[in-house]
Image (cartoon, rainbow, N blue to C red):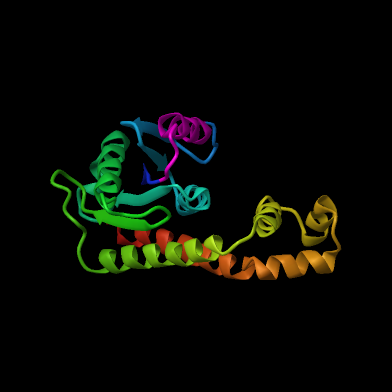
Amino acid sequence: MFAIHASYRGRMRRRSAYVREVVEAFSQSPVVQAVEHKGVEDFVVVTEGPEETGGVVLSLIQGGDFAIGIGTVTGGASAPEEDAEELEKEAIAAAGRAVTRTQKATTVTVRIERPGPGGVLAPGTAATIGEDIAAAFTLLAFVLSRRTDEGREATALLRAGHLQSEAAAIVGISKQAMSQRLAAAGWQAEQSGWNLAVHMLARVDELKG
């Protein structure tokens, strides 16, 4: 189980309404277990596994308006005995502690804590894994920040499951032009960053027990 805390860092005047709209959109997502609106500019999303977590974080990075903190609880003999509700509360708290006041939009921080009160960081390998997760999302944020509107359209179609030929037909360009557009958009780099992020999130499970 993971929690993703998002804190608005944009400049919209109607930020409160915008954040509510984002919360409502996530509440309709099948990959989200729960969403909780916190204050005016913050909310937290609870997800079950690495791919669901990666998808939510990638969506927030693409939006460009939120600082992001990922929190989870793992390790320690007491972890299997904790009920799901308590683990969820602890993951949410960890995600909130991961986000700092000075953290900028699209940046991702990770906090892996031991179960129980106090918000104690899990030692050793957990810290390294957390740093690697953050680094993978930093790579993704860099790639996405350099993408044009045409590149975003092309990559969104492939991310939705379309083949390059299908995406080209939808956009109304040749397959070769679509290939060039994807290359310019850094599609392969995005895939590498995505796979690394999901792989590192999955490694959190290795810390349990």
Q: Identify the residue shown where x is 40% and y is 40%.
A: 46
Q: Quadrant of the C terminus?
A: bottom left
Vertical order, 122 against 82 (above or below):
below
Left/right placement of residue 34 relative to residue 80 reads right
The span shown in magenta is 10-27
Residue 190 locus on image (x, y percent): 57, 65
Q: Identify the residue shown where x is 64% and y is 65%.
A: 185
Residue 65 locus on image (x, y percent): 45, 47
Q: Identify the residue shown where x is 75% and y is 54%.
A: 162
Total marks in image? 0
Q: Is residue 100 magenta?
A: no
Residue 87 locus on image (x, y percent): 28, 41
Which residue is the extreme one toward the left? 118
**Is residue 199 shown to the viewer in this render?**
no
- Towards the viewer: 83 or 110: 110
Residue 20 locus on image (x, y percent): 45, 30
**Is residue 181 shown to the viewer in this render?**
yes
Left/right placement of residue 191 relative to residue 155 reads left
Q: Identify the residue shown where x is 53% and y is 33%.
A: 25
| The quarter of the displayed image where residue 124 is located | bottom left
Q: Is residue 19 magenta?
A: yes
Left/right placement of residue 179 relative to residue 205 reads right
| The quarter of the displayed image where residue 132 is located | bottom left
| The quarter of the displayed image where residue 205 is located | bottom left
